[in-house]
Image: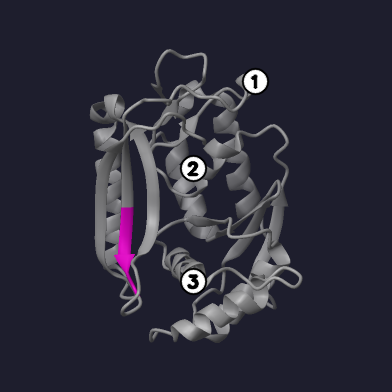
Amino acid sequence: MSAPSPQLLVAAAQHTLGMGKRRGPPRAVCLHLSGEVLAVAHGLKPALLYDCNCAGASELQSYLEELQGLGFPIQGLHILEIGDNSLIVSPERVCQHLEQVLLGTIAFVDVSSSLPHPSVRSLDQLQDLKSLVAEIVTHLQGLQKDLSLAVSCSKLCSSDWNLCTVFGILLGYPVPYTFHLNQGDDNCLALTPLRVFTARVSWLLDQPPVLLYSFSVPESLFPALMGIIDTWEKDLRTRCRTQDEFSDLSVSSEIVMLPAVVL
């Protein structure tokens, strides 16, 4: 696929994702969003969470169809609505990822406010979450493909889900955060040194790189989680080598400490 015109990418987003009299997202957001969609289509990330404005599934469906008109390989992508949130996913890639999650290939960091400090958990220690992951796999595997639609849509009920954890899993983070919902949204990360990882790739000439991933782990737990993160990075580098739309993958980290962390 030849690189599309940035002007056309911006126009596609602003035409379809504007709400009422408001135009769609700003230019930089439009360009980055199109890069993320292409990354999902090429399997560099299993999903993206749309949070640019309050556009819903129908607007996103129109947007993806506009991108298809620009040559994007979006056939087979799916819009998954969870609560009031919309994700653009590759069902095949997400299922592959979730099946690996069920095998215990990622870890979780429990940051419940009742804990004195963050703690590593395995999926086997989080049986409700394990059942939820299996439920999502079953849902995605059961989707009926309508060949007349370039992009399909579906909904999942999420009244009692920890969406922070669910989204961390679906977005492909190697170490998602989790916490007890009955303790509210507070956590034990305040003033805790965090190692923040970012993964970026180059795409459009003379444009900023596309941010594929951004996640953090408590620095105190990094030695215990290093193997999982190294495996995640090796897998990402392998996936990057199987496509030719993006180049110059960069994975970096820095340590930050914040007075409060909102998940």
- Identify the amino acid type marked 1: Asn
Asked which secondary structure carries label 3, the reply is helix
Instruction: Relative to 57, say whether 123 is above or below.
Output: above
- Residue under label 2, please give it: 169
Instruction: Relative to 95, say whether 261 is above or below.
Output: above
- Residue under label 3, please give it: 34
Asked which secondary structure carries label 1, the reply is helix
- Identify the amino acid type marked 3: Ser
Identify the mark at residue 102; answer none if there is no mark: none
Q: Looking at the image, is mark 1 or mark 3 earlier in the sequence? A: 3
**Quadrant of res 193:** top left
Q: Is residue 202 magenta?
A: yes
**Quadrant of res 240:** bottom left
Query: In the shown orientation, is residue 10 left or right of residue 19?
Result: left
Whole-percent x, y for residue 149 in the image: 68, 75
For the stretch drawn in magenta, what is the main secondary structure? strand
In this picture, which residue range is highlighted in magenta?
Answer: 199-203
> Which tag is nearer the camera, tag 3 or tag 2?
3
For the N terminus, the quadrant is: bottom left
